[in-house]
Image: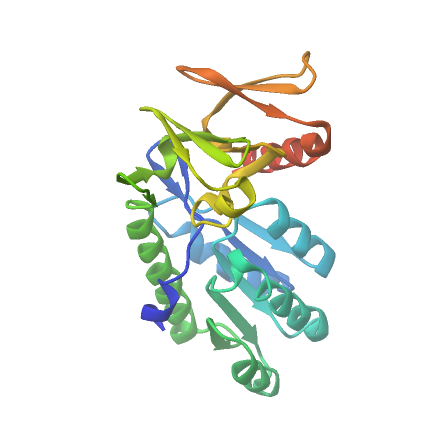
Amino acid sequence: MFQEYIKYPLIIYQRGDDIIFTVLAAFCDDQTLSVIEEIIKGFPVDIPFYTAKTLSSAMEIFTNCNIHFFIVSLDKKSCDSLQFVHELQKIKKYRTTPTILLSSNLEYLIPAFTHFKFCNYILLPFDKDTCNAFTEYLNMYFSLYQKLGQQFRVGLDMVHSYRNIPLHKIFFVEAVQHKCIIHTAEDKITISMPLYKLKQTAPLDFLKQTHRSYLVNIDNISKIDKTRDPWTISFQGYPNNALISRTYKKDVLEYLEMRMRL
């Protein structure tokens, strides 16, 4: 499973030099959540932990925040939880995200085992063995995520050169006619490719669209000037600006608010 899993892009989010790994537990009862929280607290790093009791709240969280590890209980709302996993695996960036399915009923786990990929399964209740298994799963995927995060780069194969750029050094991508300009900490790189197509290139597909002509690395924003129309984005130590159009204002602000909670 590892070899197949690492072919796909992961969302690597860093605050300074610290890699942030987020967990969402959906449809779990209070007792199960308590056990999971204790396990997560035992990790040597802070892991942001989200919980959701309903399908709508679960989908709102993973839509507005990057989640790297899902825990889904099938016991209380089996139809909603199965629909949730099904929706997850239809979305490109979550198609291969590690997911643990929990249930005290083996009859719920067996059909899920045959239907879903990239999932692990734990039969409740939590005891010493199942707690150890859960901890090993979480530790394994966190370690993999850390290793990938340390080398998360954008490879650009151009006519006269090949560029390998760390994602965190990219400020924004700007569309100019049928080309794109990638603004980085070192220089500007012109690519003969329209923005919509470049956006599909991993890991650039994780930059945030703020305008029909701009993709922005949200983590590098230093200021948003709302007095201008369109809004103007500034970056620390970089003279060029990006824009936020009216269409994307609400989406960008909600995304920034969610990231501030991490």
Position of residue 41 relative to residue 7, above or below, is: above
Quarter of the image for the N terminus: give it.
Answer: bottom left
Q: Residue at x 63, y 34 (%)?
A: 212
Q: Nearer the viewer, residue 249 or 174?
A: 174
Q: Residue at x 73, y 28 (%)?
A: 246
Residue 54 can be seen, yes or no: no
Name the image quarter holding residue 230: top right
Quick check: 229 left or right of 187?
right
Name the image quarter holding residue 163: top left
- Number of numbered discs overlaid on the protein picture: 0
Where is residue 106? Give x, y as percent: 56, 86
Q: Nearer the viewer, residue 117 or 185?
A: 185
> How does the figure colour the protein chain or chains?
rainbow
Name the image quarter holding residue 226: top right
Q: Nearer the viewer, residue 240 or 111?
A: 240
Where is residue 48? Give x, y as percent: 49, 45
Where is residue 68? Give x, y as percent: 47, 54
Q: Residue at x 28, y 51 (%)?
A: 147
Quick check: 152 left or right of 205?
left
Residue 214 can be seen, yes or no: yes
Quick check: 254 left or right of 129?
right
Where is residue 129? Give x, y as percent: 38, 75
